[in-house]
Amino acid sequence: MMERYALELIEHGKRVDKRKFDQFRDIEIKTGVISKAEGSAYVRIGKTQVIAGVKIGVGTPFSDSPNNGVLIVNTEFTPMASPEFESGPPGENAVELARIVDRGIRESKSLETEKLVIVPGEKVWTVFVDIHIIDHQGNLIDAAALAAINALITAKLPKLEEGKVVAGEHGDKLPVAHKPVTVTVCKVGDNLFVDPAIEEESVVESKVSIAVMEDGKICAIQKQGASGIAFNDLEAIVDLAIKKAGDLRKLM
Amino acid sequence: MKAREVVLPGDMLDERKGRKLGNGVYEEDGKVFSKLLGIPRISENELAVIPMYGTYLPKMGDRVVAVIESVEISGWFVDINSAYTAFLPVSEGVEEFVDMQRSDLTRFFDVGDIIYCRLSRVTKQKTVQASMRDFESRKLRNGIIIKVTPTRVPRIIGKEGSMISMIKASTKCDIIVGQNGVIWIRGDTKDKAIEAIITIEKESHTMGLTEKIEKMLGEVNGQGD
Amino acid sequence: MGKATDKELIVNGRRLDGREPYHMREIKMSVDEISSANGSAKVSFGKTTAYASVHGPRSLFPKFLQESDTGILRCRYNMAPFSVDDRKSPGPDRRSVEISKVIRRAFEPVLFLEDYPKSTVDSFIEIVEADGSTRVTGINALSMALASAGIPMKDLVAACSVGKISDTLIVDLNGVEDNNSESDVGVAMMPQKDIVTLLQMDGILTKEELVMLLNLARESCKKIYQIQKQTLMEKYRGAE
């Protein structure tokens, strides 16, 4: 019902919650919220809430990279978070979100996997980042990416004694070299805006998620949505993402 | 053989200049583009593209060869060789009064029966109604059906029916060509008719096709077939 | 998936397979490869080979999936188990689920699905040999398969990969380059409309490098489009 109204507003340069096009909703970041996890973060953007938890275990490396630890990012769209989510195996939206977040971290080489080797070629640390969607009120990707990186930078490696993990005890910090931030730029007609509220998200024609590093370099891009984007509009989209990523990073 | 001009999706045909938009085209900023791989038809009144391939999309008034798919209480669902199934209500399928509470409709048409019918209504959302309430529509008995690419039907029929008349005359077969690409054929020399039809289907985009088919059928006759 | 290599990937301005940075591999295209489909095509960029087929528009069941005012597009990208060095276990994994989705998104803006309410256009991409750039190769094939199936479209879709290796910007990454690049970008666009319908990037780039790569991708897509066009024309124009 609200979607049409949201669209009408955007076409007139306005938004349902009176924000500017380049303005995020208020953001809250809390780390260390789950004591059972090696690292965790709660992120709230407006009413959207996600929790990312990092669990770290001892595993075997992939055969093609024997001297690197393993990073696995997974998302669960729990049915409580939205009437649109159903239980069962992750659908394509959940898979896509996890892979966008994964690439932001992996491609920026944020997690120093070469420092996660216990016995070269045999034993490495496996880092699971699980992102739980608590309330879906728009812009899940930016919230999930923000939660994931905050959980990682605050995570600690479990304590090892004679090759075994000592439950509940922690040692060094998880080696994280960068803090990529993902900003999704949305497009309706000629209007570009960030951080769509849920009503706005359903009228977005296309959107581009861009992961940006501390120095303004870009480490991952994914276009989404059912419409194409004029080639000549791409640069403005990238510029807006770089600018907003800088703002978000200040909150970390 | 000389080639016909072919356009691809996205190729610009012309400025619109107030003309009617026919099949297979779209307009953007006063310019008209092709939606399809096909042959452009640009006239003073209309811009269109005749598709070379594609499944059958039902149009109101089309005459089709169809197969009864299921028998319901108030009529029949018929397969019209499309993404859409047509419904033939009792009142459109049978002349006499039928008491639907008591009658078994298989008495008129049963599953698998072949009919020639007209699409009397096609809604925007592609709900299709068939009708047999005219002189040409009827149940087709004892023949076989073949399927061709629906976009080739105009070539198989030919200008004012010239091509199909020629095939009918040479092979002495009964042939009914549905707009939906389903063709019903009955006759002893139906193999020859089918061969001719398939040749037209394959080579419909080439010039000089009539002569080729004429020659082909002539050879058939020449061999005293 | 990929293997790292210690080899220099660019020596004296040439790539390991002898190409100059902006050169694409040998491109082969053909249509009508699969007779049971309404439209089909096969495209190779070097060793990477993709088949694409289109079935439909056809009726869509279960019925609750139907949209009363438009048709829908379904898309499946799949890699054959023998297409890669280490056998890939059959069936969809997370990677192929995501790729299937972005490929569908790359075509939705292009098709006039509203001409076929309640129906589905089912499209399939099978990678039979993978040596980098598989999704864009699949997109190039699917574009031609859709056109030859007679599905109404705004334009064809042409796609290519670009990237950066040892500070050099390159076009059409092969497998080794894909696995060892500093960054790679996949682009699909409507070449006659200048509209981008797929954009994915990973690896590290400055904004200036990204803009240069996008321009390279656009130029390359236009070249690919010419080959697609030529292939479709030759096939359907008949003998001269």
Image: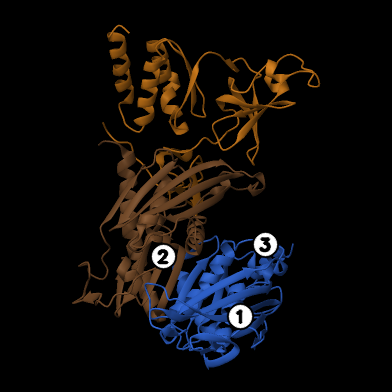
Chain colours: A blue, B orange, C brown
**Quadrant of the image for the C terminus of chain A?**
bottom right
- In-front residue for pair C192/A88: A88
Residue pointed to by mark 1: A53
Residue that sits furthest to the front in the current view: A162
- Name which quarter of the figure residue B218 lies in: top left
Q: Is residue C147 placed above or below B200 in the rendered structure?
A: below
- Give, as a three-letter code, the residue at label 1: Gly
Left or right: residue A228 compared with residue C79: right
Residue pointed to by mark 2: C187
Asked whether the residues under the numbered discs 3 and 1 touch, taking CB atoms below 8 Å apart as contact, a structural biologist would say no
Asked whether the residues under the numbered discs 3 and 2 touch, taking CB atoms below 8 Å apart as contact, a structural biologist would say no
Q: Position of residue B215 (x, y in %)?
A: 29, 17
- Give, as a three-letter code, the residue at label 3: Ser
Q: Is residue C72 placed above or below A187 in the rendered structure?
A: above
Residue pointed to by mark 3: A87
Do circles 3 and 2 both sit on a common chain? no
Q: Which chain is indicated by disc 2?
A: C
Do circles 2 and 1 both sit on a common chain? no
Crowd class of label 1 (few under 14; some 14 to 19; many from 20; radius 10 Å): many
Left or right: residue B95 compared with residue C23: right
* SS at mark 2 in the image: strand
Q: Which chain is indicated by disc 3?
A: A
**Spatial CA span between label 3 and label 2:** 33 Å
Which of the numbered marks, if any, corresponds to residue C44?
none
**Spatial CA span between label 2 and label 1:** 33 Å
